[in-house]
Image (tube, coloured by chain):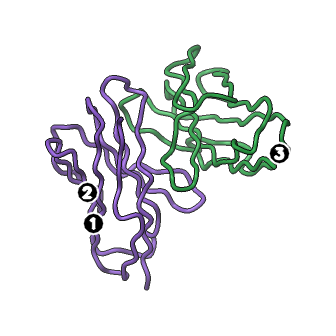
Amino acid sequence: KNQVEQSPQSLIILEGKNCTLQCNYTVSPFSNLRWYKQDTGRGPVSLTIMTFSENTKSNGRYTATLDADTKQSSLHITASQLSDSASYICVVSEADSSYKLIFGSGTRLLVRP
Amino acid sequence: NAGVTQTPKFQVLKTGQSMTLQCAQDMNHNSMYWYRQDPGMGLRLIYYSASEGTTDKGEVPNGYNVSRLNKREFSLRLESAAPSQTSVYFCASSWGGRTEAFFGQGTRLTVV
């Protein structure tokens, strides 16, 4: 069964610190992997999209990595800010059905002052 | 640009009532989607419309119907609401299946 597992479920860090969120997937065949940020009460907003040929992709203080061989991805947040408090969702697109996205349940990040 | 707009933002229904969730996008996207988000679970696809004039079932279509009214608008209808349909509903749009999806702000629906 195609699945996307994220860890940790929740994380608390101090403002200014770095953190790394993990995503493991079993989706096959694989088309692309996305990271979304979802603020409380809002819809998800795209951070990055990576295909199997891309190892690293950055968007400001967010850097995503992908290892298609081990089916793992990570999202690294540098110099965290209070506004980074949100849920971060890993999403994998199947190659067989371009409209089918498999969503992880997310990591809830809280940045404290 | 408004992006993806959903109405209403909040709704309480009694079991058996019907309602339609509205969604409109102003990005000229071809594809539109309806998802539901439940606590502790990832978003699940209810229905999608790959292009104007087409609709297809997603992972959890039972109890729902959709209409792609035109390229901009994609509505989701609950004919006879059930408590199991209490959820947050998100509409999204994209150029195509493998491209970035843009989400609306969500509709929080409670069925009592």
x, y percent for residue B83: 75, 45
Q: Which residue is drawn at the image coordinates 49% and 21% (left, top)? A: B50
Whether residues under marks 2 and 1 lie with C-beta atoms below 8 angstroms apart, the answer is: yes
Amino acid under label 2? Ser
Question: Which residue is at the far front?
Answer: A1
Kindly identify which residue carries mark 2. Answer: A74
Please state the horizontal and vertical placement of residue A75, each as a whole percent of the image: 28, 59
Q: CA distance from mark 2 to mark 3?
A: 40 Å
Could you tell whether B36 is left or right of A26 in the image?
A: right
Q: Residue furthest bottom?
A: A113
Q: Chain B colour?
A: green
Left or right, A78 with respect to B52, comes to: left
Which mark is first along the chain, 1 or 2? Answer: 1
User: Label 3 belongs to which residue?
Assistant: B13
- Residue at image location 28% in from the left, 50% down from the top: A24
* Alpha carbon separation for disc pair 3 and 1: 41 Å
- Residue furthest to the top: B53
Q: Chain of mark 2?
A: A
| Residue A67 picture location, percent across and down | 16, 47
Q: Is residue B76 left or right of residue B79?
A: left
Question: Mark 3 belongs to which amino acid?
Answer: Leu
